[in-house]
């Protein structure tokens, strides 16, 4: 389908595709097997200016926004979504600074993210606070011109590899949601350490670690916005990044669909290519239709956000929900078309099926997404009266 | 000068379009039209069944230079030892010289290498031009270019042949450029055209997908570098007599490049280009250490070890082992491809081997399309079985 | 350091197929690319500039469409491009090509190093690099796999040979041809692609080059292609059947019969 990309957007897509096919594809299976962080590829992406596409020009970016982020994430995900999420997590980590940072903070951190010199990450989740942000137990206590942070963040993508972290911590526990604040913490700050690397079902090239804070002192000027804005900052950040998860899901599914079509045209059973069987044809047709529908929704949402829409929470949730559920179904079907071969590591579809699952879970489970959508529906209806 | 379509003869059959390697032809209203991409290569002229395409040159004012006669072979040597390709060139050169009723000569440059000159005579050279001196001990572009160019100007051979080795392909273009004559690279076939007594030089192009026959009608000498292992070696005949003409370049040679050091660098003992048997490993090996099986197999057969590009790119084995378009072109008697699917770039480098054996678990692998003998199976079963039979003396 | 990289736009031979019915080349739909060996030359030129400063100019001869190859080189990081394009250049063999490129290089003023790929994948001649060096009267090293040192007026490099390598030094200005071992060419960057879109490519015709008009194109080419044909494709042979032991035994029998082992 023609999405009427601009010349620049076509360039972004073409370059991301080349890197995915030429640099990522040869090592994707090995990165997955060895659970190795793809530093070489991160350097390639940086050298190609792809970390600059989602940031404004005044901060060293190329002036693109969420849509460009989606294009790159999708292309990388077609080949390896572990690589894609390592890339996209740096964008996620940059959003709180871009959206809520003051000029000093933006000038200090964003150019380093845009050049790819440093990776970023976002730290919200804890053992007892995932979708329920109010359960956060990490604290940041103001002491003179410093905040002292204590607590542990869990399952942080790019944890240990990134240099720039935005961490949500409680500055006033009594106020619940309204007592959370967002603070920038740099790797190497005394009292800031990392837990062991998690072993995962999928996206195994990406690094997932705990962030451990023990009397970690950071300058008070690292506070983003004002005290108490942490929850808002987290929600706005996710609103901007969720289409990225949608794009990741679309990319994985497209990769699985492409592999399934190729395989169906090669594999012979009962003396015929299996692509001549209607059972296979219908599966492929459904997969292709669902991928395209999800892509259309993701792109439309990204464009809505980029055009400055005030509240895209509902659409953002819809695109993440729809694309990730679609991705799970399509990858399962791709494995089915491959039959026994699809279950083996010799072919890429089993990895895609493992990689797909996380898209239904992270950045708000799909159950939470439905809550968000429903809440907005009801609010909208109520406000009409 | 130019290319022209004779519209009355053109039927719009489009065969020329298919033949054009540059995509320069289209058919408009049933007539072929040749566009700017045309490189005047002549493929369409050959392809046109109606003779409707013509390449015309301005009537040449040049006369064929006179007084050129004889076939020369440049005798590349390393540490005083003549490179094997030279004997192949003497064998082929003899045939050309006989057809022309001319002499066969060799040019030998080195430090103290007279012994090798006799060897060249035993292999058919009627004359050996011998130039000795410390500046010529090892190959060096400048003095080699200077000596060969001056000898050619003095003695005027009609044809000069050289092996298409690193040496030949490095300095022969400089010699030809200095003499403002034509040079055809990497020939696989040489013949003499009956009518004009021209050298017909045939060579592969487009990665071996097409062959081109090239002539050098108005300039002399006609020069070619020739691929190793394509022509038959001259038979050694100690009774053959020839003369040695010594030339002295002492004090006349200069060089702007200085060779500081030479390093031999080969993992296995057998040189790929020289080997009679090559065992090559591909991606089907799965990982670097499995190349050990290929090495063991090669050792048992007394073969050299080759590799596909994929394995070299993956760092499993050094580049010097790579066979194919971006690696070496080989022509062993037996080429055994193990776990190599047979991408066109690989086939280009080995498909002129006498016998090709393919071992691959994918029956649809393209390698089987060129294999003399194919075994569809797991190389980790087939090769150990083969090795054990060799060890039992079955081969 | 002023560097000139010579490149060629070629059809991607990996994509070329032979029509099995007519035994002719199928050229339709084959993309035009920068000759792969030339991408190593471009990368090396950019690396030298990154280390020593200066500029890299990319030079090619070809039809107007070859401009695309120059833009791709600029997207990789080359500073500027020159295209030699004129009907008078058509039909150039390696001698006439070397002549045209060397005339163009003379027009460019002071330079330190010319870099070419080892050979082009369409012609595979490897003759234009040394030809240019000879016409410019500058020293030359073929098959460079590593530059050990380069500074004002001096270069030391490793030349790849069949059985190893040689370490060679020479003065600048000079010319080298490079092999794939020398580096890993970078992909373009987005900023490079944006720049490539905007950059003006100089197009030079035969008049601009001056020199002896009889030495360009078909007239300046001593060699002529008189015939192009497709080699008989090698035919597949026998697939050996049976269990592994039987297959291997059959193969050994066949190999023995050939008396090659």
Image (cartoon, rainbow, N blue to C red):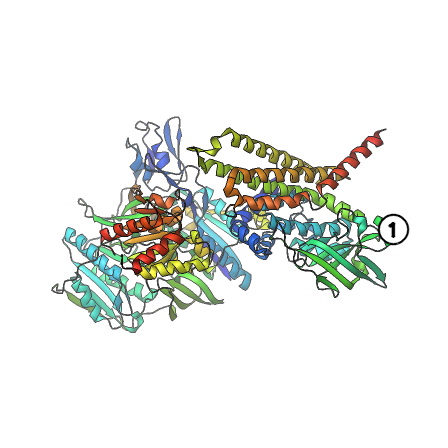
Residue B240, quarter of the rendered image: bottom left
In the image, is C106 to the left or to the right of B105? right
Residue at image point 46% right, 46% down: C33
Residue C45 point in image, percent of width and height? 49, 58
Between A148 and C61, which is closer to the camera in this rendering? Answer: A148
Between A285 and B227, which is closer to the camera in this rendering? Answer: A285
Is residue C107 visible to the viewer in this orientation of the structure? no
Q: Which quarter shows the N terminus of chain A? A: top right
Is residue A185 visible to the viewer in this orientation of the structure? yes
Between C224 and B224, which is closer to the camera in this rendering? Answer: B224
Residue at image point 78% right, 56% down: A183
Mark 1: secondary structure: helix
Residue C135 point in image, percent of width and height? 37, 58
Q: Which residue is mark 1?
A: A175
Please identify the residue farthest to the left as the structure is shown: B239
In the image, is C220 to the left or to the right of B118? right
Residue at image point 61% right, 46% down: A355
Q: Chain of mark 1?
A: A
Residue A255 point in image, percent of width and height? 56, 42
The crowding category of the residue bearing disc 1, from other C-alpha atoms within 10 Å (few below 14, some 14 to 19, many at least 20), is few
Residue C238 point in image, percent of width and height? 30, 44
Between A346 and C86, which is closer to the camera in this rendering? Answer: A346
């Amino acid at each position: 389908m023609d999405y009427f990309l601009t010349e620049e957007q076509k360039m972004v897509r073409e370059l991301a595709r080349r890197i995915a096919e030429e640099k990522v594809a040869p090592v994707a299976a090995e990165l997955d097997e060895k659970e190795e962080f793809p530093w070489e590829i991160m350097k390639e992406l940086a050298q190609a200016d792809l970390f600059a596409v989602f940031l404004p020009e005044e901060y060293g970016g190329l002036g693109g926004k969420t849509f460009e982020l989606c294009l790159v994430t999708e292309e990388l995900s077609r080949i390896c979504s572990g690589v894609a999420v390592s890339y996209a997590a740096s964008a996620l980590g940059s959003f709180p600074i871009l959206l809520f940072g003051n000029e000093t903070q933006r000038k200090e951190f964003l150019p380093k993210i845009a050049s790819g010199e440093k990776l970023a990450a976002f730290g919200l989740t804890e053992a007892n606070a995932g979708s329920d942000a109010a359960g956060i137990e990490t604290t940041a206590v103001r002491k003179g011109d410093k905040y002292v942070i204590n607590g542990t963040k869990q399952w942080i993508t790019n944890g240990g590899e990134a240099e720039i972290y935005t961490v949500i911590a409680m500055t006033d526990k009594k106020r619940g949601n309204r007592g959370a604040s967002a603070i920038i913490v740099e790797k190497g700050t005394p009292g800031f350490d990392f837990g062991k690397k998690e072993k995962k079902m999928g996206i195994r090239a990406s690094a997932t670690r705990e962030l451990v804070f023990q009397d970690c002192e950071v300058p008070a000027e690292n506070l983003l916005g004002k005290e108490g804005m942490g929850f808002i900052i987290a929600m706005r950040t996710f609103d901007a990044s969720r289409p990225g998860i949608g794009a990741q899901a679309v990319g994985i599914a497209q990769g699985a669909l492409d592999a399934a079509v190729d395989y169906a045209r090669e594999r012979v059973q009962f003396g015929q290519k299996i692509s001549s069987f209607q059972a296979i044809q219908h599966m492929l047709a459904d997969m292709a239709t669902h991928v395209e529908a999800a892509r259309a929704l993701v792109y439309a949402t990204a464009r809505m956000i980029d055009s400055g829409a005030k509240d895209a929470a509902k659409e953002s949730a819809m695109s993440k929900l729809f694309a990730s559920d679609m991705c799970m179904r399509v990858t399962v079907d791709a494995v089915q078309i491959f039959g026994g071969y699809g279950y083996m590591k010799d072919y890429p579809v089993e990895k895609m099926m493992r990689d797909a699952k996380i898209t239904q879970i992270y950045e708000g489970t799909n159950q939470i997404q439905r809550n968000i959508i429903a809440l907005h529906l009801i609010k909208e209806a109520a406000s009409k009266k | 000068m130019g290319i022209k379509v004779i519209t009355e003869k053109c039927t719009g059959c489009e065969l020329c379009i298919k033949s054009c390697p540059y995509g320069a032809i289209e058919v408009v209203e049933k007539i072929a039209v040749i566009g700017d991409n045309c490189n005047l290569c002549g493929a369409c002229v050959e392809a046109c069944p109606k003779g409707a395409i013509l390449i015309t040159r301005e009537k040449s004012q040049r006369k064929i230079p006179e007084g050129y006669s004889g076939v020369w072979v440049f005798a590349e040597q390393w540490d005083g030892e003549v490179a094997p390709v030279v004997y192949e060139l003497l064998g082929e050169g003899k045939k050309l010289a006989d057809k022309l009723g001319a002499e066969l000569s060799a040019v030998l440059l080195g430090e103290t290498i007279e012994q090798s000159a006799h060897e060249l005579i035993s292999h058919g050279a009627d004359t050996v031009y011998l130039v000795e001196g410390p500046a010529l001990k090892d190959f060096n572009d400048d003095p080699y270019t200077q000596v060969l160019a001056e000898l050619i100007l003095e003695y005027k051979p009609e044809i000069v042949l050289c092996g298409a080795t690193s040496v030949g392909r490095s300095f022969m273009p400089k010699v030809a450029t200095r003499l403002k004559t034509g040079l055809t690279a990497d020939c696989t076939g040489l013949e003499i055209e009956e009518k004009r007594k021209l050298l017909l030089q045939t060579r592969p192009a487009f990665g071996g997908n097409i062959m081109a026959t090239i002539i050098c009608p108005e300039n002399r000498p006609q020069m070619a570098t020739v691929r190793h292992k394509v022509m038959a070696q001259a038979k050694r005949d100690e009774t053959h007599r020839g003369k040695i003409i010594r030339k002295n370049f002492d004090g006349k040679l200069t060089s702007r490049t200085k060779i500081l050091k030479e390093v031999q660098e080969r993992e296995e003992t057998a040189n790929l280009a020289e080997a009679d048997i090559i065992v090559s490993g591909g991606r089907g090996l799965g990982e670097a250490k499995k190349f050990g099986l290929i090495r063991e197999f090669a050792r048992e057969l007394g073969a050299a070890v080759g590799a596909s590009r994929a394995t070299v790119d993956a760092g499993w084995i050094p580049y010097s082992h790579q066979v194919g378009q971006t690696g070496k072109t080989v022509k062993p008697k037996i080429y055994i491809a193990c776990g190599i699917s047979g991408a066109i770039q690989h086939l280009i480098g080995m498909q002129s081997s006498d016998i090709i054996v393919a071992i691959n678990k994918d029956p649809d692998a393209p390698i089987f399309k060129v294999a003399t003998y194919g075994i569809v199976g797991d190389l980790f079963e087939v090769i150990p079985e083969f090795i054990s039979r060799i060890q039992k003396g079955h081969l | 350091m002023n560097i000139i990289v010579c490149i060629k736009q070629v059809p991607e031979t990996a994509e070329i197929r032979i029509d099995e019915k007519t035994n002719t080349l199928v050229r339709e739909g084959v993309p035009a690319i920068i000759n792969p060996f030339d991408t190593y030359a471009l990368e090396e030129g950019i690396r030298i500039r990154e280390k020593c400063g200066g500029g890299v100019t990319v030079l090619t001869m070809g039809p107007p469409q070859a401009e695309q190859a120059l833009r791709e080189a600029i997207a990789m990081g080359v500073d500027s491009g020159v295209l030699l394009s004129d009907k008078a250049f058509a039909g150039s063999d390696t001698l006439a090509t070397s002549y045209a490129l060397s005339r163009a290089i003379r027009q460019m003023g002071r330079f330190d190093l010319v870099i070419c790929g080892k050979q082009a994948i369409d012609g595979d001649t490897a003759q234009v690099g040394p030809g240019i060096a000879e016409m410019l009267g500058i020293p030359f090293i073929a098959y460079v796999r590593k530059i050990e040192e380069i500074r004002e007026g001096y270069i030391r490099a490793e030349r790849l040979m069949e059985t190893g390598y040689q370490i060679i030094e020479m003065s600048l200005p000079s010319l080298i041809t490079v092999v794939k071992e020398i580096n890993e060419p970078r992909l373009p960057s987005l900023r490079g692609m944006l720049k490539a879109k905007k950059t003006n490519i100089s197009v030079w015709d035969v008049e601009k080059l001056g020199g002896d008009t009889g030495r360009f194109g078909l007239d300046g080419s001593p060699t002529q292609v008189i015939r192009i044909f497709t080699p008989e494709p090698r035919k597949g042979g026998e697939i050996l059947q049976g269990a592994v032991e039987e297959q291997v035994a059959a193969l050994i029998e066949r190999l023995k019969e050939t008396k090659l082992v």
